[in-house]
Image (cartoon, helix red, strand yellow):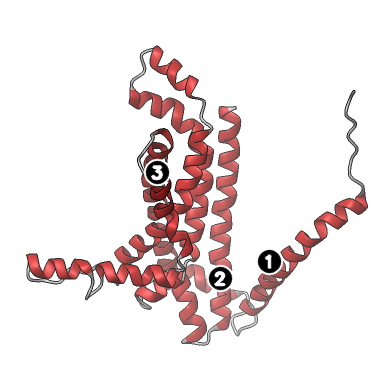
Amino acid sequence: MSRRTTAPSARALIVFALPALIVFLAFFCLPMAKLLAVSVAGDEGAGVYWTVLSSPRYLHSLLSTVLLSASVTLATLAIAGVAGTFLQRHAVPGKSILVAMLTFPLAFPGVVIGFMVIMLGGRNGLLASIGDVLAGERWTFAYGMTGLFVGYLYFSIPRVILTVMAAVEKLDTSLEEAARSLGASRWRVVRDVMLPALMPAMISSGAICFATSMGAFGTAFTLATQLDVLPLTIYNEFTNYANFGMAAALSILLGAVTWALLALARHLSGNAVAATA
């Protein structure tokens, strides 16, 4: 018997799409429209965007945020890629417990992660105590970009490692065996067989990692309010200077940069899927 498929009716499409449309309007369109209205409501009007793009202060904050997010993303992909592949391919004793510990940071808000970085690299942290004993000086890194990098890396690895493990599980091992039978070294198998197959998952999870790092606020606020990253700049413009138009314009800029990266990652991962199919 042949199975007949019918196209959904217009009424069914409306019924099933309406909740998603309401959420999209309420949590994206309306807030973005309000931000845009606030950004051009000041004395500068639409010129506030030219101020953002021409001011060394705001450009430096944007560049610092992008570079930090990019470095966190690359480090996360390297660490989570290796660890996720190893855990998925090998029978490690206590594997389930180890995976649970690696993904445990997903339960922590940014503020808690910031406090954990301070406990490790703060003025009274573990590293400071070790440095005091070994070298007579207290080693600290928590209150600058290094501390922020460690904090972002800590909550980014769990987001990527689960995706990598799921992608590795779906790899066709017969392709790797065929490459080895043709004389390919282990590195060539990784480079020419495994990495292309894992590329869609790596790109998509890396994009999420980048977007999360771009907008993360709690960790940065806990470590230091003087860090020159865009979420803190937006916070200072809004709370300390009551410059609502500039805060709104910077928010739109942050969203635009993040959205552009996500769109590029979606395009690249789609091409990668087509290339490996």
SS at mark 2 in the image: helix
Which of these two is toward me, 151 or 41? 151
Mark 1–mark 3 Cα distance, whole angstroms, equals: 40 Å
Task: First in sequence, mark 1 or 3: give its number.
Answer: 1
Task: Name the residue beneath numbered marker 1.
Answer: 28
Position of the C terminus, as image quadrant, is top right
Q: How far apart are marks 2 and 3 (CA)?
A: 41 Å
Q: In this view, which residue lies farthest toward the front?
A: 94
User: Position of 115 compared to 46: left or right?
Assistant: left
Secondary element under disc 3, as helix, strand or loop, is helix
Please name the amino acid that badge 1 sits on.
Phe
Callout 1: helix, strand or loop? Answer: helix
- Count the marks: 3
Which amino acid, mark 2? Ser
Q: Which of marks 2 and 3 is nearer the N terminus?
A: 3
N-terminal label among 1 and 2: 1
Give the amino acid at mark 3. Lys
Image point (54%, 52%), residue name: 261
- Location of residue 276 by image quarter: top right
20 left or right, relative to 188: right
Q: Residues within 10 Å of mark 3 (few under 14, many from 20)?
A: few
Task: Answer whether labels 1 and 3 touch (C-beta < 8 Å).
Answer: no
* Residue indicated by mark 2: 251
Question: Which mark, residue 95?
Answer: 3
Q: Which residue is drawn at 39% across and 29% down?
A: 190
Q: Measured from the top left, where is residue 47 in percent x and y?
A: 58, 75
The Cα atoms of the two marked residues, 1 and 2, are separated by 13 Å
Query: 230 above or below 198?
Result: below
Q: In this view, does 139 lie above or below 77?
A: below
Measured as percent of width and height from the top left, residue 99 is found at: 42, 48
